C-alpha cells in the first residue's frame, strides 16, 4: 500500500565527540511538513520517514514524499551520502526544493524531469532547473506556511539568533537589555560508535529544533537573525523579524518578498520596530497548493504502487540459470575484464548479453557478427565474419545460432581465436583458450 512519507535528517553524518554543530533549521523543516500533513488529516504515526542522506538507497514501502529540503549532489564531492537520484520506491513531490549544485548528471536531470514541475524554494534553484530544461516554479519554503500564533507575549523579549558581530553596534540598548543570544548550531556530542547520529541522538536533535521554535512562538516580541529557518518560520508565526547578515546568498531569494535583507551598508537604516509580516491570504493559497500537489500525486500513483507491490513481492524464480552458472564459471576462469562479441542476431543472443551485463558488468561488449543483418545490436556495430581478421586477438566470441556454429567454429579455430558455443542446456566453453 502506498504511504505518505516525510523527509527527516536521521542518519546525519557526525564525528565522535562534541565538535558537531548540526543546524536546527533542518528539523524545523520536518516540523513544518508535519503541520501540512495535519492539515490534510494524516496522522503523524502513519508517516514513513525517509532520511535525506539515504533517499537514493531507500528500500522500504512505496511513499509519496514531499521533497522539501536543501541538497547538494554529494557524490560529486566524495561524500558518503546517497540522495539523488531518488529511489524507485519514492514518488517525490518536489516542493520547496533547494539544489545548490548546478552541475547535474543526466541521471539526476531525468529524475527531476520525471516529476516536474519542480517547486523551487529559491530563485537560484529555479534558474538551475530551467537551465536544464526542467519545468519549475518558485514555491518558497514550507516553513512559511506555519500558522500564526494565537497570542502575543506581553513582556518584551528579543531573540538574537546567530547575528553577525558587525550589526551589534547598531542595536538599540533597550533591545539588548531585553535580548537573549542563541544559536541554531549548538554543539552536539556524538557518543555512538558509528559515523552517523543514533536514533536517540536524532530524536534529541529534532526536539531541540522544535523547542527552540516554540520558544520563539511563546516568548518573542522580536527576532533578529541571519538564519533562513529562524526568519521564515518566525515570520509565518506572526513574530516581527529583522533579517541581517554580512552577506546573503541565493538561498534567501524568495524571502525578500516579505522582509528586507539588511547587509552592512544598510545597518544604519534598520527598522528596529518592524510590524509582523501580514500575508495570511497568500499563506493559505500556498498551503492549499502544497496539499493539492501531495494528494494529486498520491491519487495518481496509489493503484500503480499496489499493482507493483503485488508483482514485485513474489518469490522469484532463477532465470537463465544455465547461462548464469556458466558465465560465472567463465568469469572465475578468466579472473579479470573480458572483451567479447556475439555471433548471430537472435533473441537468445539478447538473453545471453543481458546475463553477461547483469553478472559481469565490467566485461566489455565490442560487437556482433552476422552475415545477413546490418546496423547495430545493443549499441555496437554488426559486422560480417570477413572483418574478424581486423579485430583484436583477445576477444571471446559467443556463437549463438546452432546453424552457424560449425562454420563459425572452423573460422575462429583457424585464426586461433577464443569462442564459446551456446547450447540448449548452457555454454560449451571447450574452445576458450588461455
Image: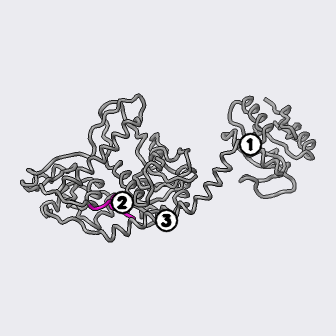
Q: Quadrant of the C terminus?
A: top right
Asked if disc 1 and disc 3 are in contact, CB closer than 8 Å, the reply is: no
Task: Please tell me how crowded label 2 is: few (under 14), some (14-19), or many (20+) other residues with Cα within 10 Å.
Answer: many
Q: Does residue 127 appear anywhere in the picture? A: no
- Residue 266's spot in the image, x, y percent? 17, 62
Q: CA distance from mark 1 to mark 3?
A: 37 Å
Span highlighted in magenta in the image: 139-148
Q: Is residue 2 left or right of residue 319?
A: left
Q: Are marks 1 and 2 in contact (CB under 8 Å)?
A: no
Disc 1 designates what residue?
Answer: 355
Look at the numbered disc 3 and give the secondary structure of its residue. loop
Q: From mark 1 to mark 2, how far is it between C-alphas?
A: 47 Å
Task: Find residue 416 and report its image quarter.
Answer: top right
Earlier in the chain: of badge 1 and badge 2, it is 2
**Which dot, 1 or 3, sits closer to the camera?**
3
Q: Residue at x 66, y 50 (%)?
A: 310
Residue at the limit of the structure toward the left, as seen here: 173
Residue 191's disc is none
Judge whether residue 10 is colored magenta: no
The residue at which mark 2 appears reads as 141
Q: Residue at x 75, y 29 (%)?
A: 333
Instruction: Return the residue found at the far bottom.
Output: 281
Q: Which residue is mark 3?
A: 117
Residue 203 position, x and y percent, is 37, 40
Local secondary structure at mark 2: loop
Image point (50%, 62%), residue name = 295
Q: Residue at x 62, y 58 (%)?
A: 304
**Could you tell me residue 232's position as x and y percent?**
29, 58
Decide which of tag 1 and tag 3 comes sooner along the chain. 3
Amino acid at each position: 500500500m502506498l504511504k505518505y512519507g516525510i523527509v527527516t535528517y536521521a542518519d546525519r553524518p557526525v564525528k565522535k565527540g562534541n565538535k558537531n554543530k548540526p543546524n536546527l533549521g533542518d528539523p524545523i523543516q520536518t516540523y513544518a511538513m508535519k503541520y501540512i500533513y495535519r492539515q490534510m488529516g494524516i496522522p503523524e504515526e502513519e508517516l514513513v520517514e525517509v532520511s535525506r542522506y539515504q533517499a537514493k538507497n531507500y528500500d522500504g514501502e512505496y511513499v509519496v514524499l514531499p521533497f522539501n529540503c536543501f541538497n547538494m549532489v554529494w557524490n560529486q564531492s566524495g561524500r558518503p551520502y546517497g540522495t539523488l537520484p531518488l529511489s524507485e520506491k519514492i514518488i517525490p513531490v518536489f516542493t520547496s526544493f533547494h539544489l545548490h549544485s548546478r552541475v547535474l548528471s543526466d541521471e539526476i536531470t531525468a529524475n527531476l524531469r520525471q516529476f516536474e514541475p519542480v517547486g523551487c524554494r529559491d530563485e537560484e534553484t529555479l534558474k538551475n532547473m530551467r537551465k536544464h530544461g526542467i519545468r519549475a516554479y518558485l514555491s518558497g519554503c514550507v516553513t512559511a506556511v506555519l500558522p500564526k500564533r494565537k497570542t502575543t507575549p506581553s513582556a518584551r523579549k528579543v531573540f538574537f539568533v546567530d547575528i553577525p558581530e558587525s550589526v551589534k553596534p547598531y542595536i538599540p540598548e533597550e533591545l539588548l537589555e531585553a535580548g537573549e543570544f542563541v544559536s541554531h548550531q549548538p554543539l552536539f556530542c556524538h557518543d555512538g560508535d558509528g559515523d552517523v547520529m543514533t536514533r536517540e541522538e536524532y530524536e534529541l536533535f529534532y526536539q531541540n529544533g522544535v523547542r527552540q521554535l516554540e520558544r520563539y512562538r511563546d516568548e518573542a516580541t522580536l527576532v533578529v537573525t541571519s538564519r533562513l529557518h529562524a526568519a521564515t518560520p518566525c515570520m509565518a508565526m506572526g513574530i516581527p523579524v529583522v533579517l541581517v547578515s554580512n552577506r546573503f546568498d541565493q538561498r534567501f531569494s524568495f524571502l525578500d518578498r516579505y522582509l528586507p535583507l539588511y547587509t552592512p551598508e544598510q545597518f544604519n537604516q534598520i527598522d528596529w520596530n518592524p510590524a509582523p509580516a501580514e500575508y495570511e491570504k497568500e499563506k493559505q493559497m500556498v498551503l492549499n497548493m502544497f496539499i493539492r500537489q501531495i494528494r494529486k500525486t498520491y491519487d495518481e500513483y496509489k493503484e500503480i504502487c499496489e499493482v507493483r507491490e503485488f508483482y514485485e513481492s513474489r518469490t522469484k524464480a532463477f532465470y537463465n540459470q544455465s547461462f548464469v552458472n556458466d558465465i560465472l564459471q567463465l568469469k572465475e576462469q578468466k579472473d579479470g575484464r573480458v572483451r567479447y562479441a556475439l555471433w548471430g542476431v537472435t533473441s537468445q543472443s539478447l538473453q545471453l548479453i543481458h546475463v553477461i551485463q547483469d553478472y559481469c558488468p565490467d566485461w566489455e561488449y565490442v560487437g556482433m557478427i552476422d552475415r545477413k543483418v546490418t546496423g547495430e545490436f545493443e549499441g555496437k556495430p554488426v559486422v560480417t565474419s570477413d572483418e574478424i581478421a581486423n579485430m583484436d586477438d583477445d576477444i571471446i566470441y559467443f556463437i549463438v545460432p546452432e546453424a552457424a556454429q560449425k562454420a563459425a567454429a572452423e573460422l575462429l579455430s583457424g585464426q586461433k581465436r577464443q569462442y564459446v558455443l551456446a547450447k540448449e542446456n548452457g555454454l560449451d566453453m571447450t574452445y576458450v583458450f588461455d
